[in-house]
Amino acid sequence: MSVTSSSRWLHRFAWLTATLTLLLPVTTGAIVTTLDAGMIFSDWPSSDGHNMLAYPWLTSARDQFVEHGHRLAGLTVGLLSIALAISAWVARASRTARLLALAIFASVFAQGILGGFRVLMDAKVMALIHGDFAAGVFSLMCVFVLVTGSRWEARTVVSDQSAGLMARNLSIVILTAIIVQYFLGGVVRHLIPFGLAGALSAAWVIHPWFALVPVLLSPILVVVAQRTGSQLLIRHANLMVVMVIGQALVGLATWYFRYGFPMWGVVAQQGSLSQIISSSVHKVVGMLTLMTSVLNVVCALAVQPPVSEVNSSRSQSFEGSMMGAAT
């Protein structure tokens, strides 16, 4: 198998790993949190004393089915992360890709340990950490997908340096805002319903309003990305707008089904199917939005001109201005 062919298969395998991670442990984890089924088993890694692979999963009750399915999904992704790390070295991928593959394996392993601690400690705070760390793991996988793709290799440096720097800085600001928003959403999901938020109880009010920050900034990023001329950055900036607006709409639906609007006579039905679906989808789309903002930052950094070129350009500009002053 040629280097080009092996790189193409590595990229496809990276896509498969990221997709299965989203569909299996991420989605089931979101449902587990919505159902508050994280402590349906008090032991780990066993389930009610059964070996993980020996538990009668298909015939179990709803909460046991979802939680044990989440554990099996985590095991599956763990095996995939091992295979991905091996594949990156066998395929003679770039040094960056190989290091990313090792980081993915290490982070998946750490995520599994966090999940175990959440059960053994029976701590809602650990559930919050476990959920937030999952977003970082998934984002890392998607960065690996990005850097192993042909479009990454074909990227061009921005010609307008000021626009490039503005895109980089704005991408970082949006990422920071979404990280804060994601954390606040985790507090609302994991802590506030159980009276454990303490000083963070204001997250219940801040979370929906703070969503306006990425909603307002994302379209500006699209305009700035257009100025850079980088197709890589433009494509991801457009995706950023779609994800942010989509997440905001899902958030409104989640609020409607979870809290209702009593002043309008709309009362939420706790534990309803619509509430379970909307809350779980909101969590998953939130993770996708965070991942997209991470890719935006990576792309914005990757299309910046080398430092030597920037310094050379500044030196030429300075010399030109001095010559003009001398004449």
Image (cartoon, rainbow, N blue to C red):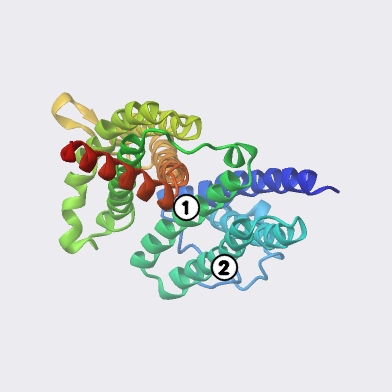
Q: Residue at x 40, y 57 (%)?
A: 132
Query: Front-most of 160 and 203?
Result: 160
Q: Residue at x 33, y 34 (%)?
A: 163
Q: Is residue 4 left or right of residue 36?
A: right
Q: Which residue is mark 1?
A: 32
Which amino acid type corresponds to the residue marked 1 in the rendered image? Val
Mark 1 vs mark 2, foreground winner is: 2
- N-term-proximal mark, 1 vs 2: 1
SS at mark 2 in the image: helix
Q: Residue at x 23, y 45 (%)?
A: 207
Which mark, residue 59? none
Query: Front-most of 237 and 279?
Result: 237
- For residue 62, say whether it is visible: no
Q: Which residue is mark 2?
A: 106
Q: Is residue 198 left or right of residue 21?
A: left
SS at mark 1 in the image: helix
